Amino acid sequence: MNLYRSVRAVADAGSTGTGVIDWGSVAESAKAATEPGDITLTPDEEAGYANDVRDARDRLRTIGEVEFDLPNAIEVQNRHHWIDANVETFRRVMKPIEEEADTLFPDIARSVNTGTMAFTLSFLSKNVLGQYDPLLLADAEEHGLYFVRPNILRVADELRVSYPRFRRWIAFHEVAHAAEFGAAPWLPEYLESRMHEAVTSIGSISLRSAPLDSQPLKELNVAMTAVEGYAELLMDRAFDDDYTDLRRKLDARRRGGGPIARVMRRLLGLGIKRQQYERGARFFEAVADARGIGAASVVWADPANLPTDAEIDDPAAWLRRVDP
């Protein structure tokens, strides 16, 4: 980690960069402030990742009654690899704000914005365990399935759980996301359009008075609740070991941490994501219990089949409307 190089990259963005955010400096600064971690795999560990992903695919296809393929890009990464893989995603998400931004002090604003994004990416790179990211993005030829090995090793040790078991649990969770996006080829474009509309509506005026109940934001939240809930259902039904202890320990870890970690989780909406898991899981559990797990996958047959915000809390209403 080189804090001087990190600060220097942000400072240089104000004088040499262009645009509201200097994305090249974002990547340089984030990596300079972050230890990459080791990704030297033993032969057994390399085989373990491959077996976990393959087993997850096979069990999810069978248990979930859904057909899907694994992403073309499956990588075991260090933290710097993860930053490089996600800079373009962040850049595209922020594009609507960058296009509309107008400031009296562009050089200062560029440095502040660049520093903020670099800090965010650095923080996330130290905490992300695995990632299936279709927002690389809707028009990308390859979706990615990533495992951030240094973080998986560290968290397994912190939770005092077996690394191979924890690694397998992460694999099942991320492959569950691959299953739902494989069943819904329209979903990446749908999420990206709602995200851009929501970001534009929020970024066009001050955050203090932003329309946080805007329709695009509501639709994005409902869709992400369905995404997280369906993956939770598949995990619960397909994972070949009890993971109650893992969930309990991870939830405790999310609530803990230092003040900076707690503030970052709040700012990044990670608490909201936990609520999405729980609310979406209750919806899909009710649908699966009433009509079978295959009925739950009907959500992904068409955008019109997504539950409304009210239906997430009233699965019977969704069943009456869609009749899977």
Image: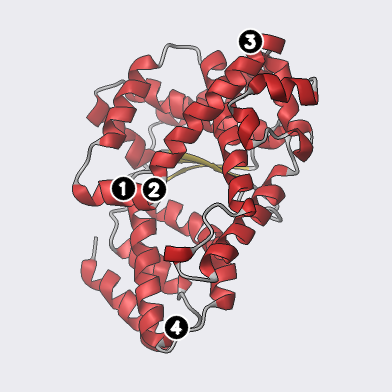
Q: Is residue 10 something that shows in the picture?
A: yes
In three-dimensional space, the C-alpha distance between marks 1 and 2, rounded to whole angstroms, equals 6 Å
Task: Give the residue number, with chain letter if any, for mark 3.
Answer: 289
Which comes before the other along the chain, label 1 or label 2? Answer: 1
Label 1 environment density (alpha carbons within 10 Å; few <14, some 14–19, many ≥20): some
Q: Residue 17's mark?
A: 4
Task: Give the residue number, with chain letter if any, for mark 1.
Answer: 37
In three-dimensional space, the C-alpha distance between marks 2 and 3, rounded to whole angstroms, equals 40 Å
Label 3 environment density (alpha carbons within 10 Å; few <14, some 14–19, many ≥20): few
In three-dimensional space, the C-alpha distance between marks 1 and 4, rounded to whole angstroms, equals 29 Å
| Dot 4 amino acid type | Gly
Q: Residue 306's mark?
A: none
| Dot 1 amino acid type | Gly
Q: At x 67% / y 10%, what residue is drawn?
A: 290
| Dot 3 amino acid type | Asp
Dot in front, 4 or 3: 3
Q: Is residue 55 something that shows in the picture?
A: no
| Dot 2 amino acid type | Asn
- Quadrant placement of the N terminus: bottom left
Dot in front, 1 or 4: 4
Residue 14 x/y as whole percent: 37, 84
- CB atoms of marks 4 and 2 within 8 Å: no
Q: Is mark 2 on a helix, strand or loop?
A: loop
Residue 179 x/y as whole percent: 65, 30
Which comes before the other along the chain, label 4 or label 2? Answer: 4
Which comes before the other along the chain, label 1 or label 4? Answer: 4
Q: Nearer the viewer, residue 63 or 280?
A: 280
Q: Residue 78's mark?
A: 2
